[in-house]
């Protein structure tokens, strides 16, 4: 082979572990096998491979987190839609007075329910007056008055707080 230069040799179309390559090392001509080149390439790329694997694992975790966030967002959207529907139910059904008490709408049962709370507009109280000519005591109350009842018994004014 001394009759040719390296540039004049045919070019190889592949490299395997047993291939021999000519190199110069510390001023001397030597040969190396393809296996040494492969090991050098593996060692040189090992850090990049590990970084790529870590990035792939992180991407997988991020994808899982995104899927979980999407599930949570869908759940929140469903809850918001239910709340909006409930609010719509109540918006057209304001509290009302019926039989002297407040009634409120129940969206679950789709009907008004009695709260038991008395519905009074004005403060209602009994007023008293004495007729000067006769000395008669007169008590006056509004029609809706449900407060204490007063009695005049043997000239003594009595009050019945819980009357039936």
Image (cartoon, grey):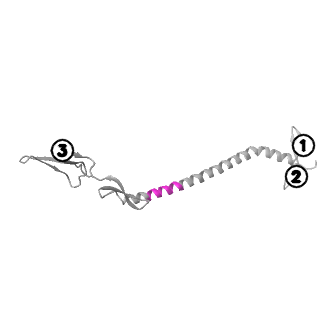
| Residue 25 shows up from this direction | yes
| Residue 125 shows up from this direction | no
Q: Which mark is residue 30?
A: 1
* CA distance for labels 2 and 1: 19 Å
Kindly give the residue lying farthest to the front in the view shown: 154
Check if residue 80 falls in the magenta segment. Answer: yes
- First in sequence, mark 2 or 1: give its number: 2
Image location of residue 125, percent across then percent down: 21, 48
Q: Looking at the image, which is closer to me, 20 or 138?
A: 138
Q: Which residue lies under the disc numbered 2?
A: 8
Image location of residue 114, percent across then percent down: 36, 56
* SS of the residue under disc 1: strand
Q: Are marks 1 and 3 in contact (CB under 8 Å)?
A: no
71 left or right of 38?
A: left
- First in sequence, mark 2 or 3: give its number: 2
Q: Nearer the viewer, mark 1 or mark 3?
A: 3
Check if residue 50 falls in the magenta segment. Answer: no
90 left or right of 28?
A: left
* SS of the residue under disc 3: strand
């Amino acid at each position: 082979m001394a009759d040719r230069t390296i540039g004049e040799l045919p070019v190889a179309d592949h490299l395997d572990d047993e291939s021999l390559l000519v190199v110069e090392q510390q001023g001397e001509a030597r040969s190396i096998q393809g296996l040494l080149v492969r090991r050098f390439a593996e060692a040189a790329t090992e850090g990049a491979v590990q970084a790529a694997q870590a990035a792939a694992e992180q991407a997988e975790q991020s994808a899982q987190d995104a899927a979980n966030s999407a599930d949570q967002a869908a759940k929140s959207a469903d809850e918001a839609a239910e709340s909006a529907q409930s609010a719509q139910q109540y918006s057209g059904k304001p509290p009302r007075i019926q039989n002297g008490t407040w009634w409120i709408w129940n969206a679950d049962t789709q009907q008004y329910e009695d709260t038991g709370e008395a519905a009074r507009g004005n403060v209602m109280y009994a007023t008293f007056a004495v007729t000067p000519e006769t000395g008669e005591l007169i008590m006056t109350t509004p029609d809706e008055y449900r407060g204490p009842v007063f009695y005049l018994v043997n000239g003594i004014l009595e009050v019945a707080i819980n009357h039936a």
